[in-house]
Image (cartoon, coloured by chain):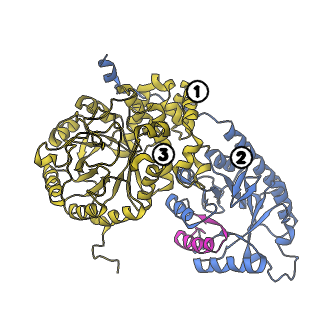
Amino acid sequence: MEPLVIGGRKFNSRLFIGTGKFGAGDIMSRAVRASGTELVTVALRRVELSGGEKDDDLLGRLDSESVLIVPNTSGARTAEEAVRIARLARAAGGYEWVKIEVVPDPDYLLPDGPETLKATEVLAAEGFNVMPYVNADPVLCLRLVEAGAVTVMPLGAPIGTNRGLRTRDMLEIIIEQATIPVVVDAGLGKPSHAADAIEMGADAVLVNTAVATAGDPVGMAQAFARAVSSAELAVDAAPREPRRPAEASSPLTGFLRDDA
Amino acid sequence: MIGLRSTKNTTEDFSEILKQWPIGRVRDFIGRRTSAEAGAAIESLGRTPVDLAALVSPAASGLLEPMAQRSAGLTRRRFGNILQFYAPLYVSNYCRNFCRYCGFNRGADVRRRALTVDEAMADAEYLSSEGFRHILLVSGEDPSRVPPEYFENLITLLCDRFASISIEIYPLDRDGYLRLVDAGADGLTLYQETYDPLVYTRMHPAGPKKDFRSRLRAIECGAAAGMQSLGIGALLGLSSWREEAFYIGMHALYLQRRYWRSHVSVSFPRMRRAAGGIAPQRSVDDSALVQMICALRLILPDAGLVLSTRESARLRDNLLPIGITRLSAASVTEPGGYVGGRRSGTQFEVQDKRSLREMADAVKERGFDPVLKDWDAAYRYDQGVSPQ
């Protein structure tokens, strides 16, 4: 497949890694390296913006030369809060990319569509590369494109559930309609789920829980990387659709021969 | 995944995509498709240029029956057993263009007439009394005879009697369309006639229609102005139908993606010899028409597919189950012709002369439900009801 381009930046890997469920320890940076990813999202609320103590700092353990660090607005419950977090990230750290997460529901952690759209409108107009995390809602995704998002990030299943592409039918529509890259985020529990998403036509996947909570996060990061690249090869190799069983019905074009 | 996506976000308008697909490349691209690719396209319902080209290619000619079965199934699944009717209302046959195939062309020796708003309303009332609720206003390209304000007035008056009002008139800019949308128009039909720029230039030697690209752009102005329904098509017979079908498919996919709030429909006007016009340049036989309808249905499961009274009753009846969703009926293609009798020239010869009632019966006989009203202009206006 051709390299993925989002917001004018080229990515050689279609696997993105979230860090919310990692500690700040060595495991996180090793898993990130093993995944080959070039985009890592980091919750701004976990970042020490004042520059003080670095021991517990996620950023200090990431190589910003090889990976793009995208702050997310995790913790925001309204558009206003998300906008404030993004502006803070830009002011304090110079971040021009932001993943918008507006999650008012503390149980299922599902994103708030209307608030996400509002935040996207504001931040895109301010020149941010906005990556909104949303439910797999095709019309919302179209609206986000119009609002100026650089990608849409629909969920495959509720976050942290490891259940795979439960929103498959909606994801198919989103992918078909999309004019910007589609990153399937949340719910991918196994490498085969990630491969499934890429085979379906998603441009990239974002994984956090499945890697961070695996018995061997570094090994799992590697497994995801291979699943994603093998699915890319498969897409290029143009697989055949499964055949439908034949349907017998009366001919519809017989009238063409009656004329002869 | 390798469809139109990579080009979509950066494209200014459809002519940018056309640049990537010059006619020679398209001809060659279609010619190289295999029947295996056509079979795969029927199975997979893919929407890539390869699928589209395979379905319109000679390689798919032997697969007409499976294409028709799949197309019929898709159409029923998406639209149910419903066929929608509309009537064209010709308001003026004055024209500044020299389209060589058209009975209204400026050089043609036909009686010209532009209806006054009152005369147009008389025809409209006749159509309304016949039962039509969807109407298509048609005129030649001479805004001095029927200026935009004329349509604005007429549409405002028609809103009371018709559920849906579409226009097939000279191109306007976005603001022009916006005024008509505000007046109550919800559909824009604008055929490119041919997607082959050379044939286009040959067929339109003079007049405002001469400019291929500005005509192509107009439908997007209408879409941007909020026209809910966008009708495109090529006049079949001007150029090779396979290439036209490919371009129409690409154009429809593009419009669907870029103007996702609008509904795209495709018409299949086969060229008829008109008074003062030239004969068809390329033949499009019934099998070709069937293949084209099925191919576009497979690529565009959601599109309206429209058949006019240019076609015979027998052919129209046979095409009903295959993929068509909208039909004109009892059409008169001369201004004032519904109530005034024949006083001016026609645009083309109507083949299927059945009345709306006869059409509705024919449709029911084949197990379909005729639908006359499928929209209501009142939805678009503030009815004085607010949530709080």
| Spot occupied by residue B60 in the image (x, y as percentages of width and height) | 48, 26
> Is B61 one of the magenta-colored residues?
no
Which residue, given by chain and number where applicable, does mark 3 sit on?
B251
Q: Which of the chains is blue?
A: A
Mark 1 Cα within 10 Å, few/some/many (few <14, many 20+)? some
Which residue occupies 40% across, 31% down?
Answer: B69
Q: Residues within 10 Å of mark 3 (few under 14, many from 20)?
A: many
* Mark 1 or mark 3: whose residue is earlier in sequence: 1
Give the CA separation, mark 3 to mark 2. Answer: 25 Å
> Is there CB contact under 8 Å for labels 1 and 3?
no
Check if mark 2 and mark 1 are on a common chain: no
Please, which chain is the residue tagged with disc 1 on?
Answer: B
Q: Is residue B264 left or right of residue B9?
A: left
Q: Which chain gets the yellow colouring?
A: B
Amino acid at circle 1? Arg
Q: In the shown orientation, is residue A127 left or right of residue B375?
A: right
Residue bearing the label numbered 2: A2
The residue to which callout 1 is attached is: B32
As displayed, is residue B384 above or below residue B114? Answer: below
**Residue visible at 31% across and 16% down?**
A260
- Indicate the chain on which mark 2 is placed: A
Q: Mark 3 lies on which chain?
A: B
